[in-house]
């Protein structure tokens, strides 16, 4: 327990905080939890367990918190499902004057805390239902209960970081073009991996409509690079303190046209309308500060951040993300 407390003190409160000791587990906790802020950070510190494995691994888990919220919202006896999103359901906003008689906002808030701390596997699902906070209807509440049903079967799952002789830091960026059925705006997602598991992840509906899949991927890549740069700087500070060479910032992308656009913008007339704020990507790539690598969609780890997946595909992605069941 003393070790648990010490690591939280080391973790810090924001992205500018420097870790005082070059310890891999402390570094992971810091990088993973600075995604939260303010009151959510304090709640995370009170509910996350650090579980040591016999192989030297460290698992971040919130199994007791999951039990608590299942009981709180009357879902502790529900039947488990294999994925947090019903693939046959397409949610849309409603103009109805009455709202569902259920604690919708409270439930979504409780789930947000969970996904920002230790459960990237529900990031898209929680972001999806949060779009309907203003006027939730029965179908939206059913979608929230679906997430609870998924948690019922995965309550002991957590992020498992494994010891490694080198820092294998890599990022993944993806987008779902026109995925929102109401306004056709895109959903972007990213995942950054370290020691075999995510240290930062995000799923967000963007405020603009993109005109092509390439544009959607380009916008998502811009946001992923912004996130990846501060983690990369933190890692470099840590390894430099140990007199070692820092890792490169490598981001995987599954759209080849998007990658070409970052390197040779001359022949991309159809991209002239893209907001200039996203074109910092070209400078980052040109200076060598960011390297892009093509990967097949089948191994795109950010895919789970942009859309709902079938049960088998969702399990495949969670396994690849290093989300494991931990048993005492």
Image (cartoon, grey):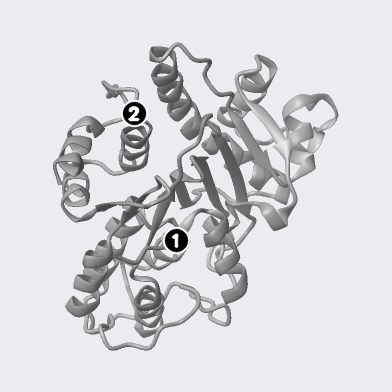
* Figure quadrant of residue 222: top right
Asked whether the viewer can see residue 212, the reply is no
Which label belongs to residue 23?
2
Q: How crowded is mark 2: few (under 14 residues within 10 Å), some or many (20 or more)?
A: few
Residue 108 x %, y %: 29, 66
Q: Which of 49 and 249 is in front in this view?
A: 49
**Res. 324 mark:** 1
Q: Residues within 10 Å of mark 1 (few under 14, many from 20)?
A: many
Q: Which of 260 and 179 is in front in this view?
A: 260
Q: What element carries label 1?
A: strand
Left or right: 264 as drawn, with respect to 98: right
Percent position of residue 206, x then y: 51, 49
Where is the C terminus found, in terms of image quarters? bottom left
Label 2: which secondary element: loop
Q: In which quarter of the image is residue 297?
A: bottom right
Nearer the observer, 273 or 161: 161
* Residue 52 percent across, percent down from the top left: 32, 50
Q: Are marks 2 and 1 in contact (CB under 8 Å)?
A: no
Q: Is residue 135 above or below residue 213?
A: below
């Amino acid at each position: 327990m003393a070790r648990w407390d010490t690591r939280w003190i080391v973790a810090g409160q924001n992205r500018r905080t420097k870790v005082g000791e070059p310890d891999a587990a402390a570094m992971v906790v810091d990088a993973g939890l600075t995604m939260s802020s303010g009151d959510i950070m304090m709640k995370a510190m009170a509910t996350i367990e650090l579980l040591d494995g016999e192989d030297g691994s460290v698992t971040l888990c919130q199994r007791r918190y999951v039990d608590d919220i299942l009981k709180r919202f009357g879902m502790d006896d529900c039947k488990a499902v294999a994925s947090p999103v019903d693939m046959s359901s397409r949610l849309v906003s409603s103009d109805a004057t009455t709202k569902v008689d259920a604690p919708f906002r409270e439930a979504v808030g409780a789930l947000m805390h969970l996904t920002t701390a230790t459960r990237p596997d529900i990031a898209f699902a929680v972001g999806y239902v949060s779009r309907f906070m203003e006027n939730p209807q029965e179908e939206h509440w059913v979608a929230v209960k679906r997430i609870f049903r998924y948690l019922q079967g995965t309550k002991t799952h957590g992020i498992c970081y494994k010891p490694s002789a080198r820092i294998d830091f890599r990022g993944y960026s993806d987008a779902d073009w026109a995925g929102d059925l109401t306004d056709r705006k895109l959903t972007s997602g990213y995942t950054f991996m370290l020691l075999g598991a995510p240290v930062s992840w995000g799923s967000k509906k963007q405020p603009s409509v993109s005109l092509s899949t390439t544009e959607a991927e380009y916008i998502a890549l811009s946001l992923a690079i912004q996130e990846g740069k501060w983690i990369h700087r933190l890692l470099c500070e840590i390894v430099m303190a140990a007199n070692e060479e820092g890792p490169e910032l490598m981001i995987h992308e599954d759209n080849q046209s998007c990658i070409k656009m970052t390197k040779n913008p001359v022949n991309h007339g159809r991209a002239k309308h893209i907001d200039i704020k996203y074109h910092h990507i070209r400078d980052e790539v040109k200076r060598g500060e960011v390297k892009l690598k093509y990967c097949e969609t089948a191994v795109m780890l950010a895919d789970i951040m942009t859309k709902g997946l079938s049960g088998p595909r969702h399990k495949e992605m969670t396994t690849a993300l290093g989300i494991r069941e931990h048993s005492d």
